[in-house]
Image (tube, helix red, strand yellow):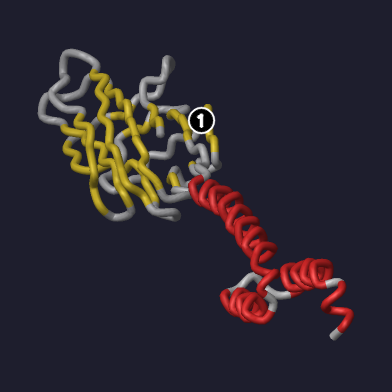
Amino acid sequence: MLIWTKMLGQYHLALCVVILFFLPKTQHSILIISSLVSVFPKFDYDYKVMQKLLRFEREIKEPKQRNACTDTKHVAFMAELSADLVDPSSGTTVVFDSVRTNVGDGYKSGPGIFVAPVNGTYSKNIVASSGTKAASSNLHLYIMQNKIQVGYVYLDDNSDRWLLRSTTAVLELNASDTVFVKVGFRRGAGNVEAVVCIHTSVVF
């Protein structure tokens, strides 16, 4: 008892350090320190200082954790046809096999399918071209999200001229959702042209 009386301040400080570094930072540990305050009144000041330090430490860590959750991943690709798609059947996937950009590796050029690597809002633009064909011929390209049609380009009524048409779809995708272009309604003969100058391409 005499030792505690003579070295009261020093022992209070040492006890405080031991509790903060060896007890988990939980409500239970705070209750333990609070009980010590009732036994040693002069411990109160050191305890309040340490409480403030703990709050300050949490305030520093929490923004870092929030920033880690909101980090974004850049995703973009551009691809085009390297050869004409001649008289494609309805249901055929249009494979844009000449890849110019593929940031995030979302576009799979083998099957011609984009697989979303992360959740997010995506914008997809398709440019399609068709050479002259019979006035009665129709050729439509559908933008598909998984199994749902979300947009299309029609290449019709061009017996006397070439067509170059485009459309854009803005999509909310979850990671692993797929987006691709397929031949939809068609009638008669007709090609999707590649040639040069990026006549038929897709940008995401």
Q: Residue at x 69, y 69 (%)?
A: 42
24 sits to left or right of 204: right
Observer-nearest of 49 and 198: 49
Q: Residue at x 29, y 41 (%)?
A: 143
Q: Position of residue 141 (x, y in %)?
A: 26, 37
Q: How many numbered circles are shown?
A: 1
114 sits to left or right of 51: left
Q: Which quadrant is the N terminus positioned in?
A: bottom right
Looking at the rendered structure, the secondary structure element under dot 1 is strand
Q: Which quadrant is the C terminus positioned in?
A: top left
Please state which amino acid type lies under the numbered disc 1: Ser
Residue 8's quadrant in the figure?
A: bottom right
| Residue 174, placed above or below residue 107 | below
Identify residue for label 1: 98
Q: Position of residue 136 (x, y in %)?
A: 10, 29
- Residue closest to the far left: 136
Residue 167's quadrant in the figure?
A: top left
Q: Position of residue 33 (x, y in %)?
A: 65, 75
Q: Residue at x 66, y 66 (%)?
A: 47
